[in-house]
Image (cartoon, helix red, strand yellow):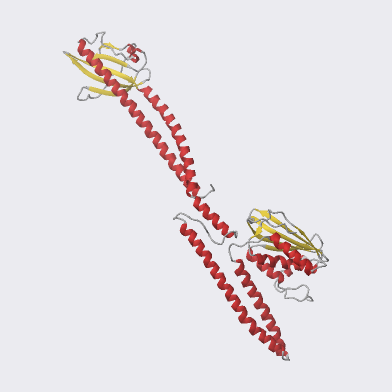
Amino acid sequence: MRKGSIAASLFWLSAGWLVLALVATGFLLTDLYSRALDASLSETLEFHVESLAGALLEEGDPSSADIALSDPRFDRPRSGWYWVIRDADGALYNLSTSVVGIDLPDMTGPSDTRGRRSAIMDDVFGTRMRVVERAVTLAPTTYQIVVTGNLSEILELVEGFRGQAFIVLGAVGVMLAIMSAIVARFALRPIDRLSAAIESVREGESVAVTGTYPREIAPLAEEVNELLRSNAQIIERARNQVGNLAHGLKTPIAVLRNEAAARKGALADVVVTESEKMSTMVATYLERARLAARTSVVGKKADPTMIMLRLTRVMRKIHPDCTIAFQRPDASLPWFRGDEADLEEMAGNLLDNACKWSNGQVGVRLDAERSETGTMLLIRIDDNGPGLSEEDAQKALRRGVRLDEKTPGSGLGLDIIKELVDVYGGSLALKRSALGGLLAELRLPTARLGAMARPNAT
Protein backbone atom coordinates (compact mmCIF):
# COMPACT_ATOMS: atom_id res chain seq x y z
CA MET A 1 0.00 0.00 0.00
CA ARG A 2 1.42 3.31 -1.06
CA LYS A 3 1.55 6.31 1.18
CA GLY A 4 -1.56 8.42 0.80
CA SER A 5 -3.54 5.67 -0.91
CA ILE A 6 -7.17 4.89 -0.13
CA ALA A 7 -6.21 1.41 1.07
CA ALA A 8 -3.67 2.88 3.49
CA SER A 9 -6.20 5.40 4.80
CA LEU A 10 -8.78 2.67 5.35
CA PHE A 11 -6.20 0.48 7.05
CA TRP A 12 -4.97 3.14 9.49
CA LEU A 13 -8.51 4.32 10.22
CA SER A 14 -9.61 0.75 10.94
CA ALA A 15 -6.46 0.06 12.96
CA GLY A 16 -6.98 3.18 15.10
CA TRP A 17 -10.59 2.30 15.75
CA LEU A 18 -9.63 -1.29 16.59
CA VAL A 19 -7.04 -0.13 19.11
CA LEU A 20 -9.54 2.11 20.90
CA ALA A 21 -12.28 -0.53 20.81
CA LEU A 22 -10.04 -3.36 22.04
CA VAL A 23 -8.49 -1.27 24.84
CA ALA A 24 -11.97 -0.27 26.01
CA THR A 25 -13.08 -3.91 25.74
CA GLY A 26 -10.09 -5.01 27.81
CA PHE A 27 -10.88 -2.59 30.64
CA LEU A 28 -14.58 -3.44 30.49
CA LEU A 29 -13.94 -7.19 30.70
CA THR A 30 -11.51 -6.66 33.57
CA ASP A 31 -14.06 -4.57 35.46
CA LEU A 32 -16.78 -7.17 34.91
CA TYR A 33 -14.45 -9.94 36.05
CA SER A 34 -13.48 -7.94 39.15
CA ARG A 35 -17.13 -7.30 40.00
CA ALA A 36 -17.97 -10.98 39.53
CA LEU A 37 -15.14 -12.10 41.85
CA ASP A 38 -16.06 -9.50 44.47
CA ALA A 39 -19.73 -10.53 44.33
CA SER A 40 -18.70 -14.18 44.72
CA LEU A 41 -16.52 -13.27 47.73
CA SER A 42 -19.38 -11.33 49.33
CA GLU A 43 -21.74 -14.27 48.85
CA THR A 44 -19.17 -16.62 50.38
CA LEU A 45 -18.73 -14.35 53.39
CA GLU A 46 -22.51 -14.03 53.78
CA PHE A 47 -22.76 -17.81 53.76
CA HIS A 48 -20.09 -18.11 56.47
CA VAL A 49 -21.80 -15.45 58.61
CA GLU A 50 -25.10 -17.33 58.36
CA SER A 51 -23.35 -20.58 59.24
CA LEU A 52 -21.78 -19.06 62.39
CA ALA A 53 -25.06 -17.38 63.34
CA GLY A 54 -26.91 -20.68 63.02
CA ALA A 55 -24.29 -22.53 65.11
CA LEU A 56 -24.43 -19.79 67.77
CA LEU A 57 -28.18 -19.98 68.06
CA GLU A 58 -28.09 -23.77 68.09
CA GLU A 59 -25.40 -24.08 70.78
CA GLY A 60 -26.56 -21.12 72.88
CA ASP A 61 -22.97 -20.59 74.06
CA PRO A 62 -20.78 -18.21 72.03
CA SER A 63 -17.59 -19.79 73.36
CA SER A 64 -18.59 -23.35 72.42
CA ALA A 65 -15.90 -25.35 70.61
CA ASP A 66 -18.56 -26.72 68.29
CA ILE A 67 -18.92 -23.31 66.64
CA ALA A 68 -16.51 -23.52 63.67
CA LEU A 69 -16.21 -23.31 59.89
CA SER A 70 -14.91 -26.14 57.71
CA ASP A 71 -13.08 -23.89 55.27
CA PRO A 72 -9.32 -24.62 55.82
CA ARG A 73 -8.37 -21.04 54.95
CA PHE A 74 -9.60 -19.96 58.40
CA ASP A 75 -6.95 -22.22 59.94
CA ARG A 76 -3.94 -20.54 58.24
CA PRO A 77 -2.35 -17.55 60.01
CA ARG A 78 -2.04 -14.34 57.97
CA SER A 79 -4.38 -15.77 55.35
CA GLY A 80 -6.76 -12.81 55.40
CA TRP A 81 -9.59 -15.22 56.17
CA TYR A 82 -10.74 -14.62 59.77
CA TRP A 83 -13.86 -14.89 61.90
CA VAL A 84 -14.62 -13.80 65.47
CA ILE A 85 -17.60 -13.65 67.82
CA ARG A 86 -17.51 -10.71 70.22
CA ASP A 87 -19.90 -8.57 72.19
CA ALA A 88 -20.63 -4.89 71.83
CA ASP A 89 -17.74 -4.01 74.15
CA GLY A 90 -15.23 -5.93 72.02
CA ALA A 91 -14.78 -8.90 74.33
CA LEU A 92 -13.90 -12.03 72.31
CA TYR A 93 -15.91 -15.20 72.87
CA ASN A 94 -14.80 -17.30 69.94
CA LEU A 95 -12.42 -16.98 66.95
CA SER A 96 -10.74 -18.87 64.12
CA THR A 97 -7.23 -20.27 64.33
CA SER A 98 -6.02 -17.71 61.80
CA VAL A 99 -6.87 -14.83 64.18
CA VAL A 100 -4.41 -15.88 66.84
CA GLY A 101 -1.98 -13.07 67.60
CA ILE A 102 -3.78 -10.26 65.75
CA ASP A 103 -6.63 -7.88 66.38
CA LEU A 104 -9.31 -7.28 63.81
CA PRO A 105 -10.20 -3.61 63.27
CA ASP A 106 -13.54 -2.37 64.55
CA MET A 107 -16.16 -1.51 61.96
CA THR A 108 -17.92 1.83 61.97
CA GLY A 109 -21.00 3.13 60.27
CA PRO A 110 -24.69 2.23 60.37
CA SER A 111 -26.06 -1.27 59.87
CA ASP A 112 -28.75 -2.23 57.37
CA THR A 113 -32.25 -3.36 58.31
CA ARG A 114 -30.95 -6.89 58.89
CA GLY A 115 -28.23 -5.72 61.23
CA ARG A 116 -25.39 -6.20 58.78
CA ARG A 117 -22.44 -4.06 57.80
CA SER A 118 -19.83 -4.51 55.08
CA ALA A 119 -16.54 -2.74 54.48
CA ILE A 120 -13.04 -3.09 52.99
CA MET A 121 -10.15 -2.95 55.49
CA ASP A 122 -6.50 -3.94 55.88
CA ASP A 123 -5.17 -6.29 58.55
CA VAL A 124 -1.93 -5.69 60.45
CA PHE A 125 0.00 -7.48 57.67
CA GLY A 126 -1.25 -5.13 54.97
CA THR A 127 -3.62 -7.68 53.45
CA ARG A 128 -6.73 -6.09 51.98
CA MET A 129 -9.92 -7.76 53.23
CA ARG A 130 -13.64 -7.59 52.66
CA VAL A 131 -15.34 -7.61 56.06
CA VAL A 132 -18.96 -8.64 56.79
CA GLU A 133 -20.46 -8.17 60.25
CA ARG A 134 -23.84 -9.29 61.62
CA ALA A 135 -25.46 -8.73 65.00
CA VAL A 136 -27.05 -11.80 66.69
CA THR A 137 -29.01 -11.45 69.90
CA LEU A 138 -28.85 -14.29 72.40
CA ALA A 139 -30.78 -12.89 75.37
CA PRO A 140 -29.77 -10.95 77.17
CA THR A 141 -26.56 -10.25 75.16
CA THR A 142 -26.08 -9.08 71.56
CA TYR A 143 -23.07 -10.58 69.82
CA GLN A 144 -21.24 -9.41 66.71
CA ILE A 145 -20.17 -12.07 64.19
CA VAL A 146 -17.34 -10.79 61.98
CA VAL A 147 -16.06 -12.73 58.95
CA THR A 148 -13.33 -11.50 56.57
CA GLY A 149 -12.14 -12.70 53.15
CA ASN A 150 -8.85 -12.04 51.36
CA LEU A 151 -9.52 -9.31 48.81
CA SER A 152 -5.84 -9.05 47.79
CA GLU A 153 -6.08 -12.49 46.18
CA ILE A 154 -8.96 -11.27 44.04
CA LEU A 155 -7.02 -8.15 43.04
CA GLU A 156 -4.11 -10.34 41.96
CA LEU A 157 -6.47 -12.52 39.93
CA VAL A 158 -7.91 -9.41 38.32
CA GLU A 159 -4.42 -8.15 37.40
CA GLY A 160 -3.52 -11.50 35.90
CA PHE A 161 -6.78 -11.59 33.99
CA ARG A 162 -6.16 -8.06 32.68
CA GLY A 163 -2.74 -9.00 31.34
CA GLN A 164 -4.04 -12.16 29.66
CA ALA A 165 -7.05 -10.30 28.28
CA PHE A 166 -4.86 -7.66 26.64
CA ILE A 167 -2.59 -10.33 25.15
CA VAL A 168 -5.58 -12.15 23.66
CA LEU A 169 -7.22 -8.93 22.50
CA GLY A 170 -3.91 -7.79 21.00
CA ALA A 171 -3.69 -11.01 19.00
CA VAL A 172 -7.32 -10.55 17.93
CA GLY A 173 -6.51 -6.95 16.96
CA VAL A 174 -3.59 -8.05 14.79
CA MET A 175 -5.76 -10.61 13.01
CA LEU A 176 -8.52 -8.04 12.52
CA ALA A 177 -6.01 -5.50 11.20
CA ILE A 178 -4.68 -8.04 8.70
CA MET A 179 -8.23 -8.89 7.72
CA SER A 180 -9.00 -5.17 7.36
CA ALA A 181 -6.02 -4.72 5.04
CA ILE A 182 -7.08 -7.74 2.97
CA VAL A 183 -10.67 -6.49 2.78
CA ALA A 184 -9.47 -3.01 1.79
CA ARG A 185 -7.31 -4.42 -1.00
CA PHE A 186 -10.12 -6.70 -2.15
CA ALA A 187 -12.68 -3.88 -2.08
CA LEU A 188 -10.34 -1.56 -4.01
CA ARG A 189 -9.40 -4.16 -6.61
CA PRO A 190 -11.90 -2.70 -9.14
CA ILE A 191 -10.05 0.63 -8.87
CA ASP A 192 -6.78 -1.16 -9.67
CA ARG A 193 -8.47 -2.80 -12.67
CA LEU A 194 -9.77 0.59 -13.81
CA SER A 195 -6.30 2.09 -13.44
CA ALA A 196 -4.81 -0.78 -15.46
CA ALA A 197 -7.46 -0.31 -18.16
CA ILE A 198 -6.71 3.43 -18.42
CA GLU A 199 -2.98 2.67 -18.54
CA SER A 200 -3.67 0.16 -21.32
CA VAL A 201 -5.40 2.92 -23.30
CA ARG A 202 -2.53 5.31 -22.71
CA GLU A 203 0.05 2.72 -23.79
CA GLY A 204 -1.83 1.94 -26.99
CA GLU A 205 -2.97 -1.56 -26.06
CA SER A 206 -6.66 -0.61 -26.14
CA VAL A 207 -8.79 2.15 -27.61
CA ALA A 208 -11.30 2.32 -24.74
CA VAL A 209 -11.70 1.40 -21.08
CA THR A 210 -13.19 -2.08 -20.98
CA GLY A 211 -14.47 -4.32 -18.18
CA THR A 212 -17.28 -4.48 -15.65
CA TYR A 213 -17.02 -2.29 -12.55
CA PRO A 214 -19.11 -1.72 -9.38
CA ARG A 215 -21.76 0.96 -9.56
CA GLU A 216 -19.64 3.34 -7.45
CA ILE A 217 -16.91 3.64 -10.10
CA ALA A 218 -18.75 2.51 -13.24
CA PRO A 219 -19.70 6.17 -14.03
CA LEU A 220 -16.00 7.08 -13.92
CA ALA A 221 -15.15 4.44 -16.54
CA GLU A 222 -18.03 5.67 -18.70
CA GLU A 223 -16.87 9.29 -18.38
CA VAL A 224 -13.33 8.32 -19.40
CA ASN A 225 -14.65 6.53 -22.48
CA GLU A 226 -16.87 9.50 -23.31
CA LEU A 227 -13.85 11.81 -22.95
CA LEU A 228 -11.87 9.59 -25.33
CA ARG A 229 -14.72 9.62 -27.85
CA SER A 230 -15.07 13.39 -27.56
CA ASN A 231 -11.32 13.84 -28.00
CA ALA A 232 -11.34 11.64 -31.11
CA GLN A 233 -14.25 13.65 -32.57
CA ILE A 234 -12.50 16.97 -31.90
CA ILE A 235 -9.32 15.70 -33.55
CA GLU A 236 -11.25 14.40 -36.55
CA ARG A 237 -12.99 17.75 -36.95
CA ALA A 238 -9.63 19.52 -36.68
CA ARG A 239 -8.17 17.27 -39.38
CA ASN A 240 -11.10 17.99 -41.67
CA GLN A 241 -10.78 21.73 -41.09
CA VAL A 242 -7.03 21.59 -41.77
CA GLY A 243 -7.69 19.72 -45.02
CA ASN A 244 -10.39 22.18 -46.05
CA LEU A 245 -8.08 25.10 -45.28
CA ALA A 246 -5.30 23.52 -47.31
CA HIS A 247 -7.53 23.08 -50.33
CA GLY A 248 -9.02 26.53 -49.89
CA LEU A 249 -5.67 28.39 -49.79
CA LYS A 250 -3.46 26.40 -52.10
CA THR A 251 -5.50 27.03 -55.23
CA PRO A 252 -5.72 30.87 -54.90
CA ILE A 253 -2.02 31.10 -54.08
CA ALA A 254 -1.14 28.89 -57.05
CA VAL A 255 -3.30 31.07 -59.36
CA LEU A 256 -1.57 34.24 -58.11
CA ARG A 257 1.86 32.68 -58.59
CA ASN A 258 1.08 31.41 -62.09
CA GLU A 259 -0.50 34.66 -63.23
CA ALA A 260 2.42 36.68 -61.92
CA ALA A 261 4.96 34.33 -63.47
CA ALA A 262 3.32 34.84 -66.87
CA ARG A 263 3.86 38.60 -66.71
CA LYS A 264 6.94 40.78 -66.70
CA GLY A 265 7.85 43.61 -64.41
CA ALA A 266 8.72 44.49 -60.81
CA LEU A 267 5.17 43.98 -59.55
CA ALA A 268 5.02 40.49 -61.01
CA ASP A 269 8.34 39.60 -59.41
CA VAL A 270 7.09 40.83 -56.03
CA VAL A 271 3.88 38.82 -56.38
CA VAL A 272 5.83 35.67 -57.25
CA THR A 273 8.21 36.11 -54.32
CA GLU A 274 5.49 36.85 -51.80
CA SER A 275 3.24 34.06 -53.06
CA GLU A 276 6.12 31.61 -52.62
CA LYS A 277 6.49 32.82 -49.03
CA MET A 278 2.75 32.50 -48.48
CA SER A 279 2.78 28.98 -49.87
CA THR A 280 5.67 28.03 -47.58
CA MET A 281 3.98 29.57 -44.53
CA VAL A 282 0.66 27.87 -45.28
CA ALA A 283 2.37 24.51 -45.76
CA THR A 284 4.34 24.96 -42.56
CA TYR A 285 1.40 25.87 -40.34
CA LEU A 286 -0.84 23.26 -41.89
CA GLU A 287 1.85 20.69 -41.18
CA ARG A 288 2.11 21.88 -37.59
CA ALA A 289 -1.66 21.62 -37.14
CA ARG A 290 -1.63 18.15 -38.68
CA LEU A 291 1.15 17.02 -36.35
CA ALA A 292 -0.55 18.45 -33.25
CA ALA A 293 -3.82 16.73 -34.14
CA ARG A 294 -2.14 13.41 -34.88
CA THR A 295 -0.04 13.31 -31.73
CA SER A 296 -3.07 14.15 -29.58
CA VAL A 297 -4.59 10.75 -30.28
CA VAL A 298 -4.35 8.56 -27.18
CA GLY A 299 -3.35 4.93 -27.44
CA LYS A 300 -0.73 4.72 -30.21
CA LYS A 301 2.71 3.11 -30.15
CA ALA A 302 5.32 1.96 -32.61
CA ASP A 303 8.24 -0.47 -32.72
CA PRO A 304 11.41 1.62 -33.28
CA THR A 305 13.51 -1.40 -34.28
CA MET A 306 11.24 -2.30 -37.17
CA ILE A 307 10.98 1.33 -38.27
CA MET A 308 14.75 1.86 -38.27
CA LEU A 309 15.28 -1.41 -40.15
CA ARG A 310 12.84 -0.23 -42.81
CA LEU A 311 14.41 3.25 -42.98
CA THR A 312 17.96 1.91 -43.34
CA ARG A 313 16.89 -0.35 -46.22
CA VAL A 314 15.28 2.62 -47.99
CA MET A 315 18.26 4.93 -47.41
CA ARG A 316 20.70 2.34 -48.72
CA LYS A 317 18.79 2.40 -52.00
CA ILE A 318 18.54 6.21 -52.11
CA HIS A 319 22.20 6.69 -51.14
CA PRO A 320 24.02 3.67 -52.58
CA ASP A 321 27.45 5.21 -51.96
CA CYS A 322 26.77 5.49 -48.20
CA THR A 323 27.42 2.65 -45.76
CA ILE A 324 24.80 2.59 -42.99
CA ALA A 325 25.72 0.55 -39.91
CA PHE A 326 22.68 -0.23 -37.79
CA GLN A 327 23.40 -1.79 -34.41
CA ARG A 328 20.19 -3.68 -33.74
CA PRO A 329 19.08 -3.69 -30.05
CA ASP A 330 17.71 -6.67 -28.14
CA ALA A 331 14.01 -7.43 -27.67
CA SER A 332 13.83 -5.57 -24.34
CA LEU A 333 13.98 -2.17 -26.05
CA PRO A 334 10.77 -0.26 -25.18
CA TRP A 335 8.42 0.94 -27.92
CA PHE A 336 7.83 4.54 -28.93
CA ARG A 337 4.62 5.97 -27.43
CA GLY A 338 3.16 7.76 -30.43
CA ASP A 339 2.25 7.52 -34.08
CA GLU A 340 4.42 5.32 -36.31
CA ALA A 341 4.40 7.89 -39.14
CA ASP A 342 5.73 10.57 -36.77
CA LEU A 343 8.66 8.39 -35.73
CA GLU A 344 9.39 7.62 -39.39
CA GLU A 345 9.32 11.33 -40.21
CA MET A 346 11.67 12.33 -37.40
CA ALA A 347 14.15 9.48 -37.74
CA GLY A 348 13.90 9.45 -41.56
CA ASN A 349 14.77 13.14 -41.88
CA LEU A 350 17.73 12.80 -39.53
CA LEU A 351 19.00 9.69 -41.32
CA ASP A 352 18.55 11.31 -44.74
CA ASN A 353 20.50 14.39 -43.64
CA ALA A 354 23.28 12.19 -42.24
CA CYS A 355 23.55 10.32 -45.55
CA LYS A 356 23.57 13.57 -47.56
CA TRP A 357 26.36 15.21 -45.56
CA SER A 358 28.47 12.17 -44.72
CA ASN A 359 31.62 11.02 -46.46
CA GLY A 360 30.18 7.54 -46.94
CA GLN A 361 29.78 6.31 -43.36
CA VAL A 362 26.67 6.58 -41.11
CA GLY A 363 25.93 4.85 -37.79
CA VAL A 364 22.51 4.19 -36.21
CA ARG A 365 21.95 3.01 -32.62
CA LEU A 366 18.84 2.50 -30.48
CA ASP A 367 18.95 2.48 -26.67
CA ALA A 368 16.72 2.88 -23.62
CA GLU A 369 17.81 5.75 -21.40
CA ARG A 370 16.58 5.32 -17.82
CA SER A 371 16.40 8.11 -15.25
CA GLU A 372 14.45 9.07 -12.13
CA THR A 373 11.67 10.54 -14.29
CA GLY A 374 11.21 7.39 -16.39
CA THR A 375 12.51 5.63 -19.48
CA MET A 376 13.13 7.41 -22.80
CA LEU A 377 13.87 5.96 -26.24
CA LEU A 378 17.27 7.23 -27.41
CA ILE A 379 18.01 7.25 -31.18
CA ARG A 380 21.61 8.11 -32.14
CA ILE A 381 22.46 8.88 -35.76
CA ASP A 382 26.03 10.00 -36.56
CA ASP A 383 28.17 10.42 -39.67
CA ASN A 384 31.75 11.11 -40.75
CA GLY A 385 30.93 14.31 -42.61
CA PRO A 386 32.13 17.85 -41.89
CA GLY A 387 29.87 18.18 -38.84
CA LEU A 388 28.72 21.42 -37.20
CA SER A 389 30.14 23.75 -34.63
CA GLU A 390 28.13 24.32 -31.45
CA GLU A 391 26.94 27.69 -32.77
CA ASP A 392 25.94 26.25 -36.14
CA ALA A 393 24.13 23.36 -34.42
CA GLN A 394 21.95 25.86 -32.55
CA LYS A 395 21.28 27.79 -35.77
CA ALA A 396 20.33 24.63 -37.63
CA LEU A 397 17.38 24.09 -35.27
CA ARG A 398 15.89 27.51 -36.00
CA ARG A 399 12.99 27.89 -38.41
CA GLY A 400 14.04 28.48 -42.03
CA VAL A 401 17.74 28.89 -41.25
CA ARG A 402 19.97 27.22 -43.85
CA LEU A 403 23.68 26.87 -43.31
CA ASP A 404 24.22 25.99 -46.99
CA GLU A 405 22.18 28.29 -49.24
CA LYS A 406 23.41 26.50 -52.37
CA THR A 407 21.36 23.37 -51.66
CA PRO A 408 17.64 23.62 -52.57
CA GLY A 409 15.13 23.46 -49.76
CA SER A 410 13.02 25.48 -47.35
CA GLY A 411 15.21 25.07 -44.28
CA LEU A 412 12.24 23.64 -42.34
CA GLY A 413 13.34 19.99 -42.08
CA LEU A 414 15.04 20.07 -38.69
CA ASP A 415 12.52 22.55 -37.37
CA ILE A 416 9.62 20.23 -38.27
CA ILE A 417 11.45 17.46 -36.42
CA LYS A 418 11.90 19.77 -33.44
CA GLU A 419 8.19 20.63 -33.59
CA LEU A 420 7.27 16.96 -33.41
CA VAL A 421 9.76 16.34 -30.63
CA ASP A 422 8.27 19.18 -28.57
CA VAL A 423 4.73 17.86 -29.11
CA TYR A 424 5.77 14.46 -27.75
CA GLY A 425 7.76 15.95 -24.85
CA GLY A 426 11.10 14.66 -26.14
CA SER A 427 14.36 16.38 -27.05
CA LEU A 428 16.75 16.74 -30.00
CA ALA A 429 20.44 17.49 -29.59
CA LEU A 430 23.14 17.99 -32.23
CA LYS A 431 26.71 17.18 -31.13
CA ARG A 432 30.11 16.24 -32.46
CA SER A 433 30.26 12.61 -33.54
CA ALA A 434 33.00 10.14 -32.68
CA LEU A 435 33.20 9.50 -36.46
CA GLY A 436 34.18 13.14 -36.93
CA GLY A 437 30.89 14.47 -38.24
CA LEU A 438 27.52 15.26 -36.68
CA LEU A 439 25.78 13.23 -33.96
CA ALA A 440 21.99 13.66 -33.67
CA GLU A 441 20.49 12.41 -30.39
CA LEU A 442 16.70 12.03 -30.43
CA ARG A 443 14.94 11.27 -27.12
CA LEU A 444 11.27 10.25 -27.17
CA PRO A 445 8.72 8.84 -24.65
CA THR A 446 8.29 5.09 -24.42
CA ALA A 447 5.40 2.67 -24.04
CA ARG A 448 5.34 -0.82 -22.58
CA LEU A 449 6.84 -3.55 -24.73
CA GLY A 450 4.37 -4.84 -27.29
CA ALA A 451 2.76 -8.22 -26.79
CA MET A 452 3.76 -9.49 -30.26
CA ALA A 453 7.29 -10.69 -30.82
CA ARG A 454 9.46 -8.83 -33.32
CA PRO A 455 10.32 -10.64 -36.51
CA ASN A 456 13.93 -11.56 -37.07
CA ALA A 457 14.48 -8.99 -39.82
CA THR A 458 18.02 -7.89 -40.65
Left or right, 7 with respect to 274, comes to: left
Compared to residue 190, the image places residue 364 above or below, namely: below
217 or 11: nearer the viewer: 217
Q: What x and y, as percent, mark residue 142?
A: 19, 15
Compared to residue 441, the image places residue 174 above or below, namely: above
Left or right, 202 with respect to 322, comes to: left
Residue 88 visible in the shown view? no
Name the residue rendered at 73%, 62% in the picture.
309
Name the residue rendered at 45%, 42% in the picture.
16
User: Split into 4 quadrants, where in the image is the C terminus?
Assistant: bottom right
Residue reaching furthest top? 65
Residue reaching furthest left? 140
Q: Quadrant of residue 333?
A: bottom right
Compared to residue 117, the image places residue 213 above or below, namely: below
Residue 34 visible in the shown view? yes
Compared to residue 142, the image places residue 391 above or below, namely: below
60 or 122: nearer the viewer: 60
Left or right, 319 with respect to 376, comes to: right
